[in-house]
Amino acid sequence: SATFRVSPHSNRIGLRTEGPALERASTGELPSEGMVLGAVQVPPDGRPVIFLHDHPTTGGYPVVGVVAEPALASAAQAAVGTPVRFTLD
């Protein structure tokens, strides 16, 4: 339900966000798994990252969702400071 903003640290790999940190339910290590275009991964800092076209093929942080493909072009072109909200569809 929180609102995030596009971070200046975003790039072709991923749209990084600024905002409230999400807390992990489990603090242990996770096995690496395949990453898909649009995956929303939560790294240790708790700020979601949306993987874009140059994303890695695997990752070991929790994936909490996937952005629908029609919304990815807008995400990739979002300017620094643009508000971002994650909703269930």
Image (cartoon, grey):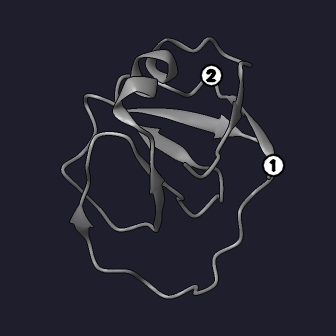
Can you tell which mark lies on residue 53?
none
The structure residue drawn at horizontal position 49% and vertical position 11%, both measured from the top left corner, is 77
Spatial CA distance of label 2 from label 1 is 19 Å
Q: Are marks 2 and 1 in contact (CB under 8 Å)?
A: no
Q: Quadrant of residue 29?
A: bottom left
Q: Which residue is mark 2?
A: 8
Give the amino acid at mark 2: Pro
Give the amino acid at mark 1: Ala
The structure residue drawn at horizontal position 74% and vertical position 19%, both measured from the top left corner, is 81
Considering the numbered disc 2 on the image, is that residue within a helix, a strand or a loop? loop
Q: Earlier in the sequence, mark 2 or mark 1?
A: 1
Please provide percent x and percent y for residue 16: 56, 36
Please provide percent x and percent y for residue 11: 43, 23
Q: Residues within 10 Å of mark 1 (few under 14, many from 20)?
A: few
The structure residue drawn at horizontal position 56% and vertical position 28%, both measured from the top left corner, is 9
Nearer to us in this view, 40 or 60 = 40
Q: Residues within 10 Å of mark 2 (few under 14, many from 20)?
A: few
Q: Quadrant of residue 86?
A: top right
Q: Which residue is mark 1?
A: 2
Q: Quadrant of residue 59?
A: bottom left
